[in-house]
Each structure stands twice: as structure tokens, then as C-alpha cells.
Amino acid sequence: MIGIDELRAELLATELPDGEFRIEGYESWLFTDCTAATPDVRSALAPGTAHPMLMFVAGMRGVGYTVEGLFALAHCAMEDGPMIAGTDVRQLRGLRVGETVTVSSRITAVDRKSGRSGTFDLLTVEHGITAADGEPVGTLVDTLMCPRGGAR
């Protein structure tokens, strides 16, 4: 198992490859429909504004790397059972239908914990979502868990 100090030295402040996400009209409509949005919710969306939960989708689908590749940076194979432990979504403005946003990601924290299920590392990855003109649109902060050993 890699030491936490070595892992922090490798990963902290690592800038991950940028990616893009485009919100298509049909995706926004389908997302609004499948979340059973009531007519009052639909009418609350300004014309041309995507469903607010698409901020989460943009942050997850718009990254410029694979989930497997990210966990590999942390010396954690998919077979080890890594998972998303939590996500915080902050929307600064609504996404616009037809808009392409850029997602920039970086690792902001690396911590080691121990519990009943064993030792694990928590990685915090912050995703900044910006419009083509550079305007900040929102952020996602993911906490990812990498199992490191058996139960204590």
C-alpha cells in the first residue's frame, strides 16, 4: 500500500485534463420529463434554461479523463471497489440549452481513514464548470473512496 505522504505528494493540486459538455434540447426535455417535474417546475425554468440537475451531469460527463484513469492515479484498481462517497453541486447560474461548457478538474485533498471495513483513502476532486466566454457556471466537488486494506 502506498504511504499517504507519498500519495499526497503525487496527487495534491494535480490538474486533470479538461473536457467539454454540450446540453442538447432533447436531453434537457427528457431529463425534466423523467424526473417527473410538475408543470409549475417546468414553468419556473426560464426559456432555454436546462433542468438544474444537468449541472451534475455536466460535471460528471464533461471531464477529460476516465474514472478508471483517475483511480489509477491514486494507485487504486477498479477491482479494489472504489466508489463515489459524495458530491456537492453548486450552481452559479442555469445551464443553457445548446451551450457547451468546459469542465476543469483538480485534486484538492487526499486523506487516509480507517474503519470497520479497513483502511481507505478519500480523494477530493473539484470540477469547475465554465461557459465559452469564461463565465463560471458552477462547481462539483466529488469525494472518492479508494479501499486500501481489509477489516481491522
Image (spheres, grey):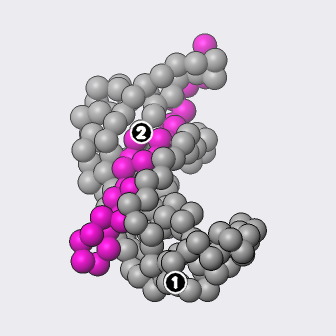
Residue highlighted by disc 2:
123
Residue, x 54% and y 33% (percent of image)? Answer: 147
Q: Quadrant of residue 115?
A: top right
Residue, x 36% and y 65% (percent of image)? Answer: 137
Residue, x 62% and y 76% (percent of image)? Answer: 43
Residue, x 27% and y 40% (percent of image)? Answer: 12
Residue 88, above or below 135: above
What amino acid is labelled 1 in the image? Pro
Question: Which tag is nearer the camera, tag 2 or tag 1?
Answer: 1
Residue highlighted by disc 1:
47
Q: Mark 1 and mark 2 in contact (Cβ < 8 Å)?
A: no
User: Residue 64: x, y in percent?
Assistant: 38, 66
Q: Name the secondary structure under disc 2.
A: strand
Quarter of the image for the N terminus: give it. Answer: top left
Residue 2, above or below 131: above
**Residue 76 shows in the view:** no
Q: Quadrant of residue 40?
A: bottom right
Residue 2, above or below 96: above
User: Residue 123: x, y in percent?
Assistant: 42, 39
Q: What's the magenta region?
A: 124-152
Magenta span main SS: strand
Q: Tell me, yes or no, whether the highlighted magenta stretch contains residue 99.
A: no
**Residue 33 shows in the view:** yes
Q: Name the secondary structure under disc 1.
A: loop
